[in-house]
Image (cartoon, rainbow, N blue to C red):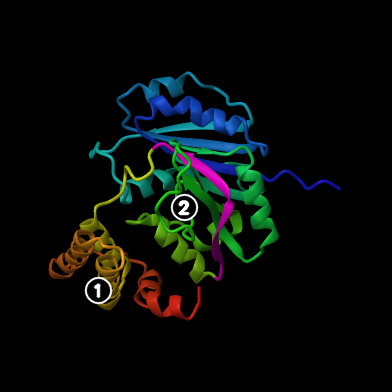
Amino acid sequence: MTNPIPNIALVTPLKDEFNNIDKFLDSLASQSTPIKCLVIVENDSTDGSKEYLDKISSIKNVSQFKVININFEDKTYRVGKKYATIIDTGFQYLKKQDFYNSLDYIGILDCDVFPEKEYYYKITNFLKSNPKIGISSGLTYTEEGQLHIADPNFVRGNSRLWKKDCLDQAGYIIAYTADTVSIALAHLKGWKTVTLKSARVVSREVNVRIANSRNKGYHAYYRGHTLFYVFLKSMYLVMFKSRAKMGYEFFVGYLNAIINQKPRVENQEVRKYFRYYLFNKLTNRY
């Protein structure tokens, strides 16, 4: 008896990706596992992306295709709440569709990310074989075949897949570093998050759109990390990674957030999760 084809829905944020659209859609058309629904959330493109998408009515290997156009007062690229708002727009659209309850998996796939042919076959089988894992992704490589410098054990936001049950239970909140926060939400509901290192995607934009270290210091404060944790991480960057400026800027960004009493994530469970982040890591709680 053959395994049933999983129902997968993907949300794709898109801004000024005219040169990537065809390659992106081709990567989906070539997937060995078909896609139930693709929702592209286009925002404020000025390079012809919006007009190009208007001409596309269907995509090979994708059963249902939807483009949502939204606009922001801030037209610049942002990796924080703006990005999370775009993703949430796609999720909210999916929840209103008649087929939503038939979905098995819901994911994010950035338009500058191109999954290998077997990507969704590998990820869905991995998730199905591991009932406790709620979110997974493969690893991101450059076009030259080099692995992205990010932690290979961190489930990537640009190509991740949730079990629908996990996303329904844990939710998705609009927040800075929403990728990291959504992992915390899943852990708090008892789900594990694990990368599948045999699955891979290629991205042209690897390391281009990365928040600076001072912003990362604020983001650590925003999530609820302690001063002690941030100090240790700063020292690690300075002493073991030989990145003195990065460590300094990270620490200063955190201190500035304390002094200026900047906003923190409102979800108290999430803040508690990150307050005890180091202890939980050391005890393998999550």
Res 119 seen here: yes
**Cα separation between marks 1 and 2:** 25 Å
Location of residue 60 by image quarter: top right
> How would you rate the neighbour count of disc 1 (Cα within 10 Å): few for under 14, some for 14-19, many for 20 or more?
some
Q: Give the structural element (helix, strand or loop) at label 2.
A: loop
Q: What residue type is labelled 1?
A: Phe
Q: What are the residue bounds of the magenta stretch? A: 190-204
Location of residue 268 by image quarter: bottom left
As drawn, the label of residue 156 is: 2
Measured along the vertical axis of the image, is residue 24 above or below residue 217?
above
As drawn, the label of residue 285 is: none
Between 32 and 246, which is closer to the camera in this rendering?
Answer: 246
User: Is residue 8 a member of the stretch shown in magenta?
Assistant: no
The picture places residue 98, in percent across and down from the top left corner, at 62, 42
Residue shown at the point (57%, 33%) measured from the top left: 28
Measured along the vertical axis of the image, is residue 67 above or below residue 52?
below
| Contact? badges 1 and 2 (CB < 8 Å) | no
Most extreme residue toward the left is 259
The picture places residue 40, in percent across and down from the top left corner, at 46, 35
The picture places residue 14, in percent across and down from the top left corner, at 40, 35
